[in-house]
Image (cartoon, grey):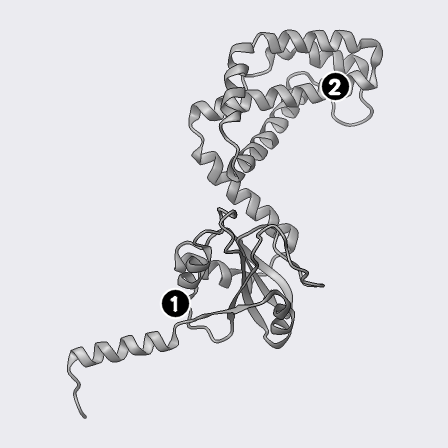
Amino acid sequence: MISLPSSLLLAAALSANIATAATVQDLKPQELAGFLARHDTVAVQFTSPDPKCRYCIGAAQAYTQAVAPSRDPGIRFVRVQWPVWHKFPDFGQLEKPVGLPEVLLYRRSEVIGGVSGKPGDARTFLAEIQGYREKPVTTKERHRAYQEAASAKALAALSPEEAASTRRLIRKDVVGQIIAACSKEFPDVATNLQQAYDAWVQGQKPVLDKAATVMLTRSSREDAYATNALVAQETEKVRTWTVDALKIPQQGKPQAESCLKFARNLGSLPDAAQP
């Protein structure tokens, strides 16, 4: 047996890795349907070189780096780009991304999973792709997962003070919508409902004014996801308070007395700043 020097063995190993590293094939939008029809499982990155798409900057390179460690011959990696990021090409009957950048995993031309945003750690990214191969998800499930992940990330980025201020402002809007609906349903008591609401709002004016200032400084896509998550949380907290504390049932047609009871007890509604 011939023994090779360790330096030659290392060089051979590196050469083998380079030779088998997964690569990304760039396709034109009109080529995608045909490519998917010829291959069983394909991960497609949708992105754009348009500098106005700030989330797309560096996404193509990140995708190339993320897929490179893959040694699985059962999946192909491709990328589709177009010059003006918001002018989506016509993909025919194929399901297209909801935003850029996004990686969709197709099996026999049907989407079975996806990863939103710029790929990060290669091991994590490939594990996500493999997870969808083993357990496909529906489009609705995928979109919900996107929003939950983005919401969690965005909420973590809010300082405790920002979160408290934002919750108070959202609480004001949630309660205001209930009062508006009651006023429309029962015009005879609308004045009483509005007066109770106005008094409740006035009592929080300093913190609400501060919250409005906070909201004006946060306008990214992540901030929108955070706000959506807080709206859902505050809506549920108000509903729970209405049922548990006020004993107002949620089933059946609303009653004017229930609306008045809700409005007159707003002062006992727990502080929205509490998670």
| Badge 2 amino acid | Ala
Label for residue 169? none
**Residue 188 location, x and y as percent?**
84, 10
Q: Position of residue 1 (x, y in %)?
A: 19, 93
Element type where label 2 sits in the image: helix
Mark 2 surroundings: few (<14), some (14-19) or many (≥20) residues within 10 A: some
Task: Identify the amino acid type marked 1.
Answer: Pro
Nearer to me, 246 or 160: 160
115 on left or right of 173: left
What residue did someone put label 2 on? 180
Is 272 situated left or right of 1 in this image? right
- Label annotation for residue 69: 1
Determine whether label 2 and label 1 are within 8 Å by CB.
no
Label whose residue precedes the other's in the sequence (2 or 1): 1
Relative to 26, 174 lies left or right: right
Count of marks placed on residues:
2
Residue beneath the point at 22% across and 76% down: 10
